[in-house]
Amino acid sequence: MNKDGFVLHGAVAYCKDKDTLITYEDAYVVCVEGICRGVFETLPEEYAGLPCEDLWDKLIIPGLIDLHVHASQFQLRGNGMDMELLEWLNHYIFPEEAKYSDLEYAERAYDLFVEDLYVGGTTRAVVFATIDPDATLGLMDMLEDTGLITYVGKVNMDRNAPDYYIETTEESLELTRNWLDAAAESEYRNTRPILTPRFTPTCSRELLKGLGAIVKEYDVPVQSHLSENLGEIESVKKLEPDTAFYAESYEKAGLLDQNRRCIMAHCVWSPDAEVELLKKYGVFIAHSPDSNTNLGSGVAPVSRYLELGLHVGLASDVSGGSTASMFAAMRAAVQASKLRWRLYDEKVLPLSFVNAFYLATKGGGAFFGKVGSFEDGYEFDAIVIDDEPLRSMREEETIAERTERLAYLADDRHVVGKYVAGRKLF
Ligand code: GUN
Ligand code: FE
């Protein structure tokens, strides 16, 4: 057989749906031309000629997907957790993001972010940069070189921000077009632009409308923040009196579109009508439990969103979230959901570990297409975990238990192999 591909041989776990973890003690995961052809206990004859990497009892799982992370906040992770969102943005975040107009600072700081993303469990990410288009292009160049697949956004904001970190409406739209043109010229293979209005409190209706037109003109996806924090929601009510709820400020600007993908981070406090709107437009919710805890925002009713059939993925939301580790995000998702259930609303069930693993793989992966699973036809994203230091001496330990333990104990050190769309990174 003369196919371009390879086989990984080891212990395997992946999610088929939100409640189903498929596990194998000893199996072969087949990649042909960048696409997964399935997992087999006995290697089919047609793949026998492919090179096979023997990983013994290391664990092979789909690459993890971070659906929302601020590269420009990486230098602040783990700090400044003493304020709620709007105060936190003004006190810590805007001064930090403003530094990225110094391209030398941007290069050094983005390099550290990119290195962290590269060595960890994340294979794909959707990233906020800053309002500076040149620094954003620099970040895109760096990410392109890693082989990770990412969407990256130049941030837009034209109101309610300090004068050292703000754009005029016209400037914001013009810089965005120029940035999109420059990104197209770069002919990136792994890196794509995504429109990134920060959120309604810092974006006028005129700016959002202008971006709504750009979405159609350039056929690009959109990311923003929605219904994260009570103070933020109050401010939107005042700023946008003609809206019944927050998401309408995006809808009225033409930013929600059934034919284009859109990510809204958080959706902690979305009223029923907003949830319906998100479903109607197929919006992806980037659930960011670590950030929502750190900023005292609340806990999104994720199991309800999953039952309603909404698209939901998991996110680190650095530096609202204190680490870019998606293992930590899984743990945070399960733990926050249990507190929400016990203390606030027993009707919304806590997330199981399998639910969280699904969110971090197939749930968020759907934003990128057929990504996040080892089913036949999925793009081949995989990470190899050496969990030997985490293993139990109990003989009856299962692959499901080993996988569950990753969320509680694994970090970058345990990620010993990474493949993105069939390409081996390490
Ligand atoms: N809302 C608007 N900007 C931000 C941000 O940078 N982080 C978080 N968590 N929420 C936001
Ligand atoms: Fe965010």
Image: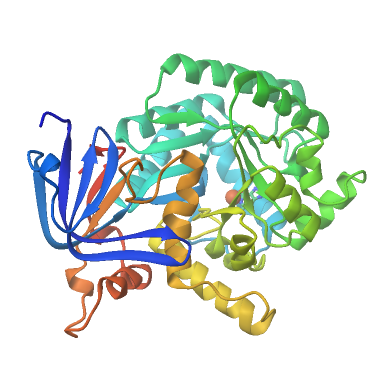
Q: Quadrant of the N terminus?
A: top left
Measured from the top left, where is residue 101 in percent x and y? 54, 30
| 355 w.r.t. 265: above or below | below
Give me the residue at 45% from left, 47% from top.
Answer: 365
| 159 w.r.t. 313: above or below | above
Measured from the top left, where is residue 75 in percent x and y? 46, 50
| 208 w.r.t. 94: above or below | above
Is residue 237 visible in the rendered image? The answer is: yes
Q: In which quarter of the image is the C terminus?
A: top left
Q: Nearer the viewer, residue 8 or 76?
A: 8
Horizontally, residue 382 falls left or right of residue 128, namely: left
Measured from the top left, where is residue 263 in percent x and y? 60, 44
| 142 w.r.t. 246: above or below | above
The part of the image, by quadrant, that contains residue 289 is bottom right
Q: Which of 17 and 207 is in front in this view?
A: 17
Q: In this view, which residue lies farthest toward the front?
A: 45
The part of the image, by quadrant, that contains residue 346 is bottom right
| Display coloring | rainbow
Is residue 424 visible in the rendered image? The answer is: no
Q: Nearer the viewer, residue 349 or 189?
A: 349
Q: How many marks?
A: 0
Horizontally, residue 316 falls left or right of residue 231, namely: left
Give me the residue at 81% from left, 44% from top.
Answer: 248
Measured from the top left, where is residue 49 in percent x and y? 7, 38
Q: Nearer the viewer, residue 363 or 142?
A: 363
Horizontally, residue 72 falls left or right of residue 375, namely: right
The part of the image, by quadrant, that contains residue 323 is bottom left
